[in-house]
Each structure stands twice: as structure tokens, then as C-alpha cells.
């Protein structure tokens, strides 16, 4: 139990529990069935997007292409099918092809040309946003196919389908990272790339694969978002960059790379979504929501500078006469 409490991923579980306990006091009805069913789909989509951001941060990066990729996914999956359910699968395939292309461009720019992740992902995001504006002329996209909307809005065994997709994806990724050789090499690459390279791990391949997988998670989030909203705006991905980073920070993933938890990140996404709903119920404007998210990131990064383990491990020494050290019974002084 003490080991779990000392884990960097424990605080977000505690904070989320406290938030849900306090929510009815400031926002009556927030924990009713309708309130939870309205919150869970948004939390699930944010969790899927934050999953990609988590693995990128585990590799000592920060993915700023997330808004563009989500927005492009919503455009492709609505504009290509044009309301025809029979063309939906092809539209989804085009989304993932675009994700793979964007991830490859980012990964190659970082590994082959030495461009920093911030600059590389910012440039790719500009390309993606430009493509979105060229396809939509800056106006709202077409409506999503009926099959996609029906799936995104439906529930299975009382649980929203978006949440089931998020849970399945998170469980699969968590198992891969914790129990497979690929996962262990991935973590080693993020913790110390130089040492990983010295042991024969193909660091560049892992970095490229990281950005491809992350981009595909953004694409999946965009597909579900398009189905849930029906007619998404021209750039709906803009609302997910800061929350995705905040969810990762809240989840306890180290910004120095290596250590991280996609499960804790998903809990952070739930915390943020519920917090936004409570803040809105209190009548706070959009500016207050952005201030809260920015403050969470700043506080989360600041708390990492506190030596929690040293403080928890410290024990007051037992006073002894004349300053002689204590010793176990029957032992030598």
C-alpha cells in the first residue's frame, strides 16, 4: 500500500476521487446518470488523444501536431463519405493513411534531420491545418455518416461506445508497454537514448514508430469526435492540445522521458473533463477554464521538483543519551 501511495501516478486517482465527491456540492446533478453520460464521451475522446501525447512525452518530446491531425481526421471522415455509409470504411482508411504519413514526416524530421520535436510537430501541424483549410475553405465540414454517428452516440450495456473504445485501446497499449519486449525497449529508449543505442536498440525506429502511433490515436479521436458531434467545426482539434498536455502532466508521466502511465493519463482526462463541467456549471467563462488548465500544468510540473520520496522516507531519529547512536538489542555499539 505504501508503495502505491508513493507512486507518481497515485495523486491523480486521489484528486479525481475528491473531485467527484465535491462535484454534487457545487453542481447538483453532475453525478446523475444523464450528467455522467454527458461527460464520459468527451472524457473518452480526450483520453484517446492524450494517449498519443503520453507516449510522445515518454520519448522526451511534445506533439504540437495533435490539433491539426484531429481536425483533418474529422474533415476526411465527413467529407469523403458525404453521408454515404458504404464509403465510411474507405474514409476511415484514408484518415489512418494520413496519420501514418504525418507521423512518418515528423519522425523522420526528428531522427534524420535533427529537428527538435517542438519545431517538427509545429511544422507538421501547420501543414495539416493548411490542408484542412484548403479542403473546407474555413467553413464547417459536412455531416458525418449516419452509421458513424449512431455508433458514437450509442451505448453498449449502458456504457457509451466511445468509452468502450477508449478503454480497449488504453488496456492494449498499457499491456504492450508493461509486459512485452517492445514495451520495455520503448521505455528504455525514452529513459536514456544513449544507453539504449549502446545495447543495440534501434532508437530511431522506435522514435518514428512513436509518432506514427501517436498520430493514429489523434486520428481515431477525430473520427469519434466527428461521429459524436455530427457536424464538427472546421478546426475542432484546437480544443484538445492544452487539455491533452494537462492530462499527461496530471497523470504523472515524467516530462524527462521514460516513466509514464497511459492509464493514469486517462484518469487525468476524466478529471479535466469533470472539472470543466463543474466550472461551467458555476457560470465561469471560457477564459477561466483556460486559466485552470494552464495552472494545472504549471502546478503539476512544479510538484515534480519536490522530493516526495525523500520526505516520505524520512523518519525522526530516536533521541539517545549523550548523543550515542542507537543500536538493535543484543548488537554491538
Image (cartoon, rainbow, N blue to C red):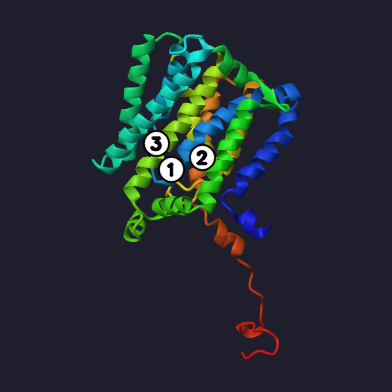
Distance in Å between CA atoms under marks 3 and 2: 19 Å
* Residue at the left extreme, as displayed: 113
Query: Which quarter of the rendering shows the C terminus?
Result: bottom right
Residue 269, horizontal then vertical, whole percent: 57, 34
**Can you tell which quarter of the image residue 317 is in?**
bottom right
Q: Between disc 1 and disc 3, whose residue precedes? A: 1
Residue depicted at x 35% and y 23% = 128
For mark 2, does the 10 Å Cα neighbourhood hold few (<14), some (14 to 19), or many (20 or more) residues? many
Task: From the image, tell me which residue sits under label 1.
Answer: 57
Residue 74 disc label: none
Residue 11, horizontal then vertical, whole percent: 61, 46
Label 3: state its secondary structure: helix
Q: Between disc 3 and disc 2, whose residue precedes? A: 3
Residue 99, horizontal then vertical, whole percent: 40, 29
Task: From the image, tell me which residue sits under label 3.
Answer: 212
- Disc 2 vs disc 1: Cβ atoms closer than 8 Å? yes
For mark 1, does the 10 Å Cα neighbourhood hold few (<14), some (14 to 19), or many (20 or more) residues? many
- Disc 3 vs disc 2: Cβ atoms closer than 8 Å? no
Residue depicted at x 36% and y 55% = 201
Amino acid at each position: 500500500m505504501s508503495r502505491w501511495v508513493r507512486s507518481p501516478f497515485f495523486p491523480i486517482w486521489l484528486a479525481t476521487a475528491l473531485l467527484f465527491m465535491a462535484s454534487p456540492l457545487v453542481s447538483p446533478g453532475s453525478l446523475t446518470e444523464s450528467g455522467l453520460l454527458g461527460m464520459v464521451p468527451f472524457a473518452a475522446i480526450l483520453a484517446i488523444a492524450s494517449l498519443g501525447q503520453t507516449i510522445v512525452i515518454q520519448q522526451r518530446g511534445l506533439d504540437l501536431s495533435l490539433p491539426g491531425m484531429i481536425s483533418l481526421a474529422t474533415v476526411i471522415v465527413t467529407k469523403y463519405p458525404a453521408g454515404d455509409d458504404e464509403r465510411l470504411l474507405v474514409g476511415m482508411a484514408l484518415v489512418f493513411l494520413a496519420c501514418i504519413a504525418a507521423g512518418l514526416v515528423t519522425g523522420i524530421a526528428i531522427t534524420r534531420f535533427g529537428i527538435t520535436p517542438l519545431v517538427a510537430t509545429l511544422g507538421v501541424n501547420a501543414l495539416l491545418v493548411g490542408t484542412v483549410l484548403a479542403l473546407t475553405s474555413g467553413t464547417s465540414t459536412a455531416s458525418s455518416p449516419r452509421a458513424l454517428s449512431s455508433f458514437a452516440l450509442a451505448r453498449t450495456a449502458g456504457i457509451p461506445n466511445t468509452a468502450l473504445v477508449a478503454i480497449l485501446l488504453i488496456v492494449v497499449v498499457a499491456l504492450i508497454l508493461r509486459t512485452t519486449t517492445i514495451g520495455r525497449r520503448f521505455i528504455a529508449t525514452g529513459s536514456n537514448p544513449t544507453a539504449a543505442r549502446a545495447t543495440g536498440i534501434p532508437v530511431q525506429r522506435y522514435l518514428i514508430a512513436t509518432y506514427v502511433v501517436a498520430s493514429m490515436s489523434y486520428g481515431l479521436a477525430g473520427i469519434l469526435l466527428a461521429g459524436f458531434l455530427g457536424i464538427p467545426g472546421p478546426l475542432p482539434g484546437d480544443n484538445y492540445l492544452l487539455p491533452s498536455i494537462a492530462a499527461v502532466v496530471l497523470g504523472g508521466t515524467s516530462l524527462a522521458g521514460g516513466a509514464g502511465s497511459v492509464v493514469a493519463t486517462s484518469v487525468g482526462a476524466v478529471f479535466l473533463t469533470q472539472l470543466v463541467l463543474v466550472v461551467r456549471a458555476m457560470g465561469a467563462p471560457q477564459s477561466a477554464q483556460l486559466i485552470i488548465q494552464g495552472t494545472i500544468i504549471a502546478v503539476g510540473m512544479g510538484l515534480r521538483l519536490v522530493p516526495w520520496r525523500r520526505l516520505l522516507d524520512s523518519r525522526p531519529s530516536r533521541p539517545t543519551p549523550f548523543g550515542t547512536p542507537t543500536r538493535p538489542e543484543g548488537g554491538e555499539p
